[in-house]
Amino acid sequence: MGFNISLGTNLFFLPFLGPVCSQTTSSLIYASENPIPVGSNVTFFSSKSVTQGAWLFNNSLIVIIIPGNSIIPSIWSSRVTFDSNTSSLSIRSLTLSDSGLYTLEAINLFSAQLTLSVQVPISNVTLMAKATNLVEFNDTAVFTCLSNGSVPSYVWLNGSSQVTAGGNVYLSNGNTTLTIVNVTRYDEGPFTCNVSNGVSYEVSPSVLLNISYGPSNTMIDIKPTSLNHAYRTGSNITLNCSAESSPPATIMWMINNVYLNQSGPQLQLLDVAPNNSGNYTCLFYNSVTLRFSSASEIVWIVDPLAAIVVNQIGGPAILNKSFTLNCNVSGTVDSIQWWRNGLLMSSNSTTILSKNTLILNPVQLSDSGNYTCQAINAVSMVTSSPYTVQVNYGPEMATIMGPNAATTGDNINLTCYASSYPSSIYTWYFNGSVVANTPLYVTPPLTTNMTGIYTCVAYNNITGLNSTANQMLTVVGKTGMVILMSLLITQISAFFLGRITDVEVIPLDMSAIEGFPYNLKCSVTGPVDRVYWLLNNQSLLADNSTGFVMNKTIFFTPLERNDTGSYQCMAMNAAENVTSPPYMLVVNFGPETPITEGPELAETGKPAIFNCSALSVPPSEISWWFNDTLITNTSMFMINELSLNMTGNYTCMAYNTVTGINSTNTVMLTVIATIKTHTVPLSSSNFTLICEVTGFDYTIQWLKDNQTLNTTTSANNTHYYIEDNKLHFTPVTISDDGMYQCVASNTLTQVQSPPYNLLVNYGPLNVTIAGPDSAALGSIVSLTCSAVSMPNCEFQWYFAGYSVAMKMGPVTTFSVHNNSEGNYTCQARNPVTNITLYKTKVFTVTGDLYRIFFACHFVKCDDLTVQI
Ligand SMILES: *[C@@H]1O[C@H](CO)[C@@H](O)[C@H](O)[C@H]1NC(C)=O
Ligand SMILES: *[C@@H]1O[C@H](CO)[C@@H](O)[C@H](O)[C@H]1NC(C)=O
Ligand SMILES: *[C@@H]1O[C@H](CO)[C@@H](O)[C@H](O)[C@H]1NC(C)=O
Ligand SMILES: *[C@@H]1O[C@H](CO)[C@@H](O)[C@H](O)[C@H]1NC(C)=O
Ligand SMILES: *[C@@H]1O[C@H](CO)[C@@H](O)[C@H](O)[C@H]1NC(C)=O
Ligand SMILES: *[C@@H]1O[C@H](CO)[C@@H](O)[C@H](O)[C@H]1NC(C)=O
Ligand SMILES: *[C@@H]1O[C@H](CO)[C@@H](O)[C@H](O)[C@H]1NC(C)=O
Ligand SMILES: *[C@@H]1O[C@H](CO)[C@@H](O)[C@H](O)[C@H]1NC(C)=O
Ligand SMILES: *[C@@H]1O[C@H](CO)[C@@H](O)[C@H](O)[C@H]1NC(C)=O
Ligand SMILES: *[C@@H]1O[C@H](CO)[C@@H](O)[C@H](O)[C@H]1NC(C)=O
Ligand SMILES: *[C@@H]1O[C@H](CO)[C@@H](O)[C@H](O)[C@H]1NC(C)=O
């Protein structure tokens, strides 16, 4: 084709190419690379082939496309290649001025456009900081990032995180300058700038800032650690001070604001003494930031307490007087505690704890006991050895036991007693002279001039108190006259003295409960010299362990259960003695912890009996509770048939309505149930037996035919394993048949489940038919089908090709006729394994023709064909 068109920059036939009927679109053309570095080659591709049209750059022609040919103006021809098959355009050695709009015009079809960006790659990126040695909070960091290349954009990084404008961070000069006002210690960098354009990127070398900061977060750490920083004299202590500071701070130590000749972070105090106590300060100074900071800790050095001893101040402990104990301890004491018989004491109206002393005022009998004092300071605690205090009292009112009258020649015993601690010293006087220095005065053989008043003086040399009792003794001759005289004297005495009446023991307290104080009083009307007490007909005089007898009253401090008994008091004067009716004192106590009986492990379906008793006066009310629900108000109860949900805590509660005390004891019952399974044991399937147990701490064991199942046998020759309360067979086989039991045991007892009889289901394995293969006409034939199977198979008989069973059951019986010949099939089906097997027997009819003929007279031989 001989077109020869001179082409200028302005295309004269543009109207001819004008986009009259075409659409402008960009998705039809694309560049091999865009943006693209200077100097490289680009190819524009069109997704549609163009036979008539042109490629243009910023409205100037690059290629004119005409069918079968193309024309490239000379200004492009050296750098441009057009592929008319694909309509693609390649331009080589791109320059920056090749950036612009490229158009592919397909006449009357479309016009597609694309903007190409030719770029100089980024190079020579440099990063500079205005200053790198900066002070935290004071200084500003300024970075400048420089580079070569077209359309650069800048990303700033501190380490791996991007730095963006905001807060004290500013970006300026087209993002080439980064300013951080008032830098902090976290602004150390490394800082980099990443410069990029569409065709390349370059990261600047990194710049580190040296930021001086601190001292901050100052601290003193003291080793060893100790509560309140208190240490024993003689300890070695190390104080370590630390601060965050760059460069490291210099350190000076002070105690109580006085400089120590000590620098460096560590201060060692060896073999400390109390005068090393003080307020320790370390002072930090950063010579670059010019800042100071400090940390302080108070350290206490305390002597451990040593000897501690309780002693008494003033006189001994005397009933109703004041008594003082002193706790003697050397050293600095923070607090003192007093203990009596192991119980911590506190101040109240009669007990005063003050500094080192314990004052009991007034002293009571119950103040007897062992006292210890305990002293505590920051580094030690010491306890004294016990100091035994025995309260001294008495003598209480002295009493004399002995006759009022005696005959000459007798030796009589006069016994004097007065309650007292320590025991009194007794002195007997008669007619102004001392006759005995013992509580018991045995008279010499009596003479009549021994009639008179006998005086006993009981003296307690600790309390300094004494008590006097007098007894009138009349000695008469051994005649009836004497007896009369003696009676007369008694009468006369009674006449003058009046009668003793209404002697009665009266309780002074409502209820007699163990552990509480209790008093019995002897109530008397009339003139009484003395009162004696009897317990179960025995004199209470000499034995004051029961109660503390004080004339007309017995004080129980407190009441004990063995104080129960029959009490009497005997009131006496010179003329007579009268004994009260007995008073029965019953001490109420308890209940003690109940004694319970009941099973800990039991089997479902079996009965269980629970019984409970508790030592108690009066007898306690007993109740049984199951998991906090009341079951019964009786001491014994029975469960007729246990079930699994009866596992639990059975608690017996004993309640004494008088003492108001209740006490409980609990039986934990574990119920074990029968063995269960959820599946049918099919031979060579997996099968599991479950031992149902509910309850507490127990272990499970399995028995097969009364032998323990060995679970430790190696895995390859066992096909079962035990998991919790399950026995898994993997799989179960006929050899597993047997009687299984599970045994649950705890530390005390064990319970065995009822047996589970395992019969593994299998088969049918081998079906056989018994019976004749042939028989003569008219005879009766039975065929019996059997199969090896568990459980037994269900049998059905089929004849010939019939699909309906002729007989159910293992045996089929028929009388032979001409039609009886054929296949007899037995179907054996195991209803559990659901396996069905068949067995067929071929049966033929035999016999002589006569018999056949004969037989046909009796049976209907319709289709019988007999050939003679
Ligand atoms: C551009 O194409 C020319 C010719 O095909 C080739 O010699 C040159 O190496 C190519 N330039 C680049 C940067 O690929
Ligand atoms: C890189 O930049 C530095 C400073 O701007 C300049 O001195 C140097 O000539 C540049 N080098 C190149 C290869 O552009
Ligand atoms: C920098 O610190 C100075 C002095 O502490 C303060 O006045 C100023 O507001 C701070 N500037 C910024 C941006 O935090
Ligand atoms: C500077 O960077 C920010 C994002 O970091 C950007 O939004 C902004 O356009 C950039 N300014 C210039 C002049 O490139
Ligand atoms: C304290 O240190 C000294 C020497 O360093 C040592 O002899 C002494 O046993 C230490 N005392 C204690 C209580 O550890
Ligand atoms: C310890 O000394 C420092 C420094 O003089 C002082 O600031 C601090 O209040 C003192 N601490 C006590 C508990 O007195
Ligand atoms: C930091 O700034 C404060 C107040 O602006 C000034 O007093 C101090 O001298 C400055 N510190 C340094 C190390 O320049
Ligand atoms: C006072 O306290 C002591 C023990 O701390 C105790 O034995 C005594 O019964 C108390 N007395 C009174 C009146 O509470
Ligand atoms: C007091 O201590 C003595 C001897 O240590 C001991 O025999 C006595 O039983 C103690 N008394 C009490 C009430 O603990
Ligand atoms: C008097 O006491 C003595 C010594 O305890 C005793 O042996 C004697 O039996 C007593 N006599 C009477 C009459 O109780
Ligand atoms: C009683 O009388 C006898 C002589 O009759 C005399 O020896 C004795 O001392 C008298 N006893 C008293 C206690 O007076």
Image (cartoon, rainbow, N blue to C red):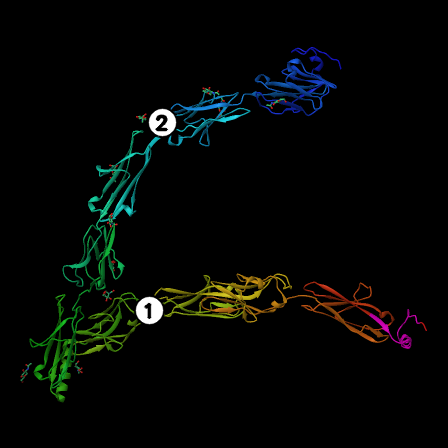
* Quarter of the rendering containing residue 1: top right
Q: Dot 1 lies on which element?
A: loop
Instruction: State the residue in front, 601 or 637.
Output: 601
Q: Quadrant of residue 275?
A: top left
Amino acid of disc 2: Asn
Numbered circle sitting on residue 128: none
The residue beneath circle 1 is: 588
Residue 464 location in percent, x, y? 12, 66
Q: Position of residue 706 (x, y in %)?
A: 55, 71
Pick out the residue farthest to the right. 868
In this view, 236 is above or below 462: above
Can residue 584 be seen here? Answer: no
Residue at left offset 9%, top offset 84%? 447
Question: With 102 as the anchor, is 495 left or right in this view?
Answer: left
Q: Is residue 541 magenta?
A: no
Residue 58 shows in this picture: yes
Neighbour tally class for label 2: few under 14, some 14-19, many 20 plus, Cα within 10 Å: some
Magenta residue span = 843-866
**Figure quarter occupied by ligand 9:** bottom left
Above or below: residue 631 compared with residue 93? below
* Viewer-closest of 559 and 677: 677
**Pick the front one: 463 or 407:** 463
Q: Tell me if label 2 and label 1 are in contact, CB under 8 Å.
A: no
Q: Secondary structure at mark 2?
A: strand
Q: Position of residue 619 (x, y in %)?
A: 38, 70
- Report which residue position mark 2 lands on: 133
